[in-house]
Image: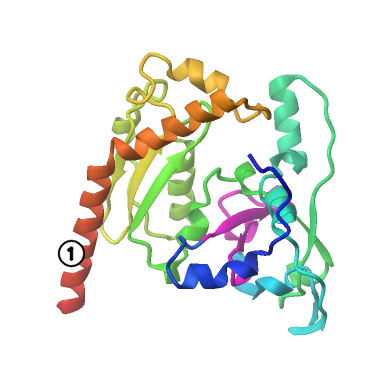
Amino acid sequence: MLSKLDKGHLSEQQSSSENGNNPYPIYAAVDERSFSKVTEYSPATWFEFTPHEASFLGYGASVPMEYFGSEYKNGELKKQKEEKNMSYLQGLWGSAIGSKTENERVIKDTKNKSTTENIKGGVAAFDSAELVKDKVISLVDAGIAINCAFPLVLRPERKVRLILSFDYGSFEPFKTLKQTAKYCKENCIPFPEIDEKLLQEPDNPSDCYIFRGDGAPTVMHFPLFNRVNCPAYVTEWRIRFTMLRFLYHVGDITKLLQSARLNVLNNKDKILQEIKYIVAHSSKEASS
């Protein structure tokens, strides 16, 4: 859907994010080396990009976004390099096919052979034995871990109270929820319990599920294709709009966007109700 390469930089979005004109963007990648050694449930796997910084979640280490790719030694900037442009970063964030692990999975699923190279991103030398021994790390699409970056949103300092989860998985509309619940349990992060009784119809899901828990954020989950926005065609549309399809005509793009739009329009009142409840509840906590 891009007509030309975006040569702008993520750090240039700081002002528009700070003044409230745009939602704050948080982009995710995973370190494939860590991912191959541990699992998607380890914070050491996750890497975060925002207009202000590039961060390794598990190590609590970060550098200003404009210095991502520059060289550091003992915490000091030694050689500044040009900031990667948005086209480069978008390629990195969407590089699932650049992952050896994901390639093997796709090959098994499709029985087709293909080879690609990992996208490499140089980062600063952080104060960690795991990181300083390698000058280059291999960052790839976070979708090979959990196909929605819940771990980044759930950082304690963000104090998130409501999550609108728009799921785009092809055939498993609740997979990211279940993975996130396991991630949070293993890392002692508050997250609402996912009631399996509500997830009994994965092939014909509803358009909105709400999960709440004491001390945990409320999660509103919206499967892309459901019995409300495409009744009787859920399976057909999942096949038609598979993630492995790389070319979409205008008509298909319009239908896809309309489906996503209906998920919000049809549940607007529920979303507003949850926001009002959380704001009111937060005000009571602040005054008590």
Residue 262's spot in the image, x, y percent? 36, 33
Q: Where is residue 135? Give x, y as percent.
A: 84, 67
Nearer-the-camera pick, 88 or 147: 88
- Looking at the picture, which amino acid does disc 1 mark? Ala
Q: What element carries label 1?
A: helix
Determine if the magenta segment contains residue 66.
no
Residue 59 in view in this figure: no
Q: Which of 246 and 92 is in front in this view?
A: 246
Q: Where is residue 285 in the image (x, y as percent from the top left)?
A: 19, 72
Q: Where is residue 14 in the image (x, y as percent from the top left)?
A: 56, 71
> For this view, does 268 lie left or right of residue 75?
left
Quadrant location of residue 230?
A: top left
Q: In the depicted view, which residue is nearer to us: 139 or 69? A: 69
Q: Which residue is drawn at 56% across and 51% down?
A: 41
Q: Circle 1 sits on which residue?
A: 280
The residue lying at 66 percent from left, 43 percent from top is 2
Label 1 packing within 10 angstroms: few (<14), some (14-19), many (20+):
few
Q: Is residue 47 above or below residue 133?
A: above
Which residue is nearer to you in this view: 269 or 191? 269
Q: Quadrant of the N terminus?
A: top right
Q: What stretch is highlighted in magenta?
A: 25-54
Q: Residue at x 73, y 50 (%)?
A: 5
